Structure formats: C-alpha cells, structure tokens
Image (spheres, rainbow, N blue to C red):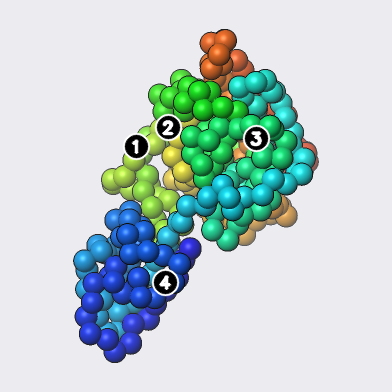
Amino acid sequence: MEQTFFVSQVAPQRLDVFLSENLDDWTRSQIKKQIDSGGALINGKTAKAGALVKSGAVVSICFSKAVGLEDVEPENIPLDIVYEDDDIAVINKPQGMVVHPAPGNYTHTLVNALLYHFKSVSQMDSTRPGIVHRIDKDTSGLLVVAKNDRAHAFLAEQFATHSAQRTYVALLEGVLKNDSGKITTFLDRDKGDRRKYAVSGSGKIAITNYEVLERYVGYTLCSFKLETGRTHQIRVHAKYIGHPIVGDKVYGFAKQKFNLEGQLLHAIKLELTHPTTKERMTFSCEMPQYFVETLKKLKKSN
C-alpha cells in the first residue's frame, strides 16, 4: 500500500502516532513494524517511528500487509505443470501472473491456482502456501512448489545456500562486447522510488553470471545464472551494465521497439535435489512464443 499525506497545521507528534490516527486498518504495532522496515518517509527521507511530524511535512508510506490464507480463494486457472509428485510440483509460470496474493491483489495469482489444482500445499508460510521462491509478475518460467512442510523446509535450505540453481534467458538492448562475465554489486531500494531496486554502496550482495548466446543487430540474447536471489536482480544488473532487458517497463528504455507486455526474461532451467529421494533433478522448458517471435524479427550479427 502506498499513500502520501500532506500535513496541515498540527502540533508535532510521533510518526507512528500520526499514521495510526490516519490509517484505519492498521494497528500501531503493525505500523511501527513497517516503519522499522524502512516503509515511511518524511520529506523524502527515511524516518523512524519516533520522528516528529510537523506542520507542512510530507509523509509517504509504502507498506506491505500480510495476507491470510482465509483471504485467498481457489481458482480454476490453467497451469503448465512440468513435473509433479507427492512432494513437489514444477510450474512453468506465464508472463503476467503474480506468484502470491498481496493487498489489493487477492485473485488470479499462482497461489489461487495451486489451491485449486493440488489437494495439499505446504503451510510453512500461511500467507504464501506452497511458495518456496518467486519470480516477477512479468517474468516467465520455472519455479518449484512444495506440497508439504517437510519438502518446503528442504527446498528452502537449497535456495538459501544456492545449491538449487536457476538459469534464465533474456534479450538485452544493445550488443555486449564480452562473451561472458560476472556482475557483483550491492542492491538496495531505490531512494527515489521504493518500488524499485538499484545498485548501491550498501545493501545486500548480488552476484549474477552471464553468457552471450547470440548477437543480433542492436540486441544480445544472454543466459544468466544467479549466485544470489535478490529481488529484480537480473533486471537491475542488466540496466547497470548499460544493456537493460527488452520490454522491461521499470528498468528498460523508455522507448521500446516491440509491443510487449513485459520484459523478455524467462526462467528456462531449474536444478535441485529432491526432498525425499535426494536425487539431483534438472527441469527445463521452452521459451514462450512471444519471446521466440521477437527473436525471429531480429537480424543476426556477423
């Protein structure tokens, strides 16, 4: 939830008190937790719960309220199930599908579909049943779903230690000179827009490996392997090296040549160890048709 308050003539009061008086559906403890997570700004600067709000101030918030499972209804949404057994399911998520519900978006998510198609999914995170890891709404491709808590815990450990490996393909603007490389930076929320992320001098370490698959006139098709799993990592790193992903409405070029619904970024391969058999498994899927059709429009570089 995002909201801005333009403060009129008031006596100075604590930020958490001010917000509790102006947000009907939030308790003061919930508000304080959101503020402590960096979700509130006074005059454009991150503020603490005890900061004073004075006349003429501009207070901006970007809060994320947890969704309870009782708020989520099963929906008969078709799923591309690449693999399924009693412990896990591997889904090829389409572009445009949100992974889990959030305030203002309780329907048409992957979780809604999971609750309909599967008899049981893990409940370790009651707000995101079955979800072990995520990919962005407008990114397509593979993700694994846990059907029980034991499988969830085992898979979550693999993603935390990076023993589960993900490979993406993306079409980038411009032509990369190097055939391969490693991008290592810190990522943090963009100071100008907290919905975005940016390379920063602090924050969380982010490491992305890339390899050129094909060069076209004005574009480069690359594969990416993640050593870390930060939000928007590949998209931010692509922008950082001066070659944003084609179709990216947030980090890409303002003017786009192709009429796309989102970025040409696809999770094409997933490797993990099965929670029961301990077998190392590899899953892959084809690029979506709109991605393939865009590549057909390009001329290969000599």
Task: Say whether disc 3 or disc 1 marks the residue closer to the N-terminus.
Answer: 3
Q: Residues within 10 Å of mark 3 (few under 14, many from 20)?
A: many
The residue mark sitting in front, 3 or 1, is 3
Closest to the camera, between mark 3 and mark 4, is 4
Three-letter code for the amino acid on which mark 1 is drawn: Ile
In the figure, is residue 209 to the left or right of 201? right
Tell how many labels: 4
As measured in the structure, the alpha-carbon distance from the residue carrying label 1 to the one carrying label 2 is: 8 Å
Q: Which mark is residue 141?
A: 3
Where residue 276 sits in the image (x, y, percent)? 55, 13
Badge 3 marks a residue whose secondary structure is strand
Amino acid type shown at disc 4: Leu
- Which residue is disc 1 drawn over? 205
Residue occupied by mark 2: 228
Q: Amino acid at mark 2?
A: Thr
Q: Give the quadrant of the C terminus.
A: top right
Q: CA distance from mark 1 to mark 4?
A: 35 Å
Mark 3 and mark 4: Cα distance apart in space: 38 Å
Residue beneath disc 4: 23
Please identify, in this view, whether the residue under mark 1 or under mark 4 is nearer the observer: 4
Q: Is residue 90 above or below residue 67?
A: above
Mark 3 belongs to which amino acid?
Gly
- Lower position in the chain sequence, tag 2 or tag 4: 4
Say which of 262 and 80 sits in front.
Answer: 80
Q: CA distance from mark 2 to mark 4?
A: 36 Å
